[in-house]
Image (spheres, helix red, strand yellow):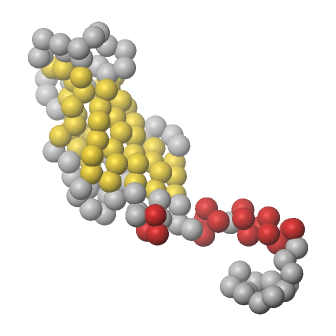
Amino acid sequence: PLSPGDNSTSIATTGWVRSAMANIPSTAAFAASFSSPGYVKFPSWLGGLIIQWGSIVSSAAGDVAVAFPITFANASRVGVAMVPSAAVGWIGILNTFLTTGCALSAWNGAGARQTANTMWIVMGN
């Protein structure tokens, strides 16, 4: 039987190839949680990119804290927030980025903070 590190000229069976292919995501350091909040984490050989998302209710009284599902290793990242069911002109804003979370607020077209279900997505590594 072949072993995972075998680079001989032995012939691989279809069963061995299918088994090896099924193990690629787990052995290649991919990680994911497709819930909300959720994330996809790519392995270091793909740059270590992490994409995280979720939704939270903003507050008219001030920023709310967004906790990322997993911690970023580095501080550089980009994110966007949106208020999907609000009136035209409403926006979501993310600020004060940390490796573990950020602050979020939602604003109406007149420049006033609003309480609204706000969706967010953040990328980094």
Q: Residue 21 in the image: x percent, y percent? A: 72, 65
| Location of the N terminus (image quadrant) | bottom right
95 with respect to 79 (left or right): left
- The part of the image, by quadrant, that contains residue 53 is top left
Q: Residue 100 in the image: x percent, y percent? A: 28, 53
Q: Residue 124 in the image: x percent, y percent? A: 32, 54
Q: Is residue 115 visible?
A: no
60 with respect to 14 (left or right): left
| Location of the C terminus (image quadrant) | bottom left
Q: Is residue 13 visible?
A: yes
Give the residue drawn at x 37%, y 20%.
84
Q: Residue 35 in the image: x percent, y percent? A: 51, 40
Give the residue drawn at x 71%, y 80%.
4
Give the residue drawn at x 36%, y 39%.
121
- The part of the image, by quadrant, that contains residue 37 is top left
Above or below, 23 against 12 in this view is above
73 with respect to 10 (left or right): left
Q: Nearer the viewer, residue 46 or 91?
A: 46
Give the residue drawn at x 46%, y 37%.
36
Above or below, 17 against 92 in this view is below
Above or below, 4 against 121 in this view is below
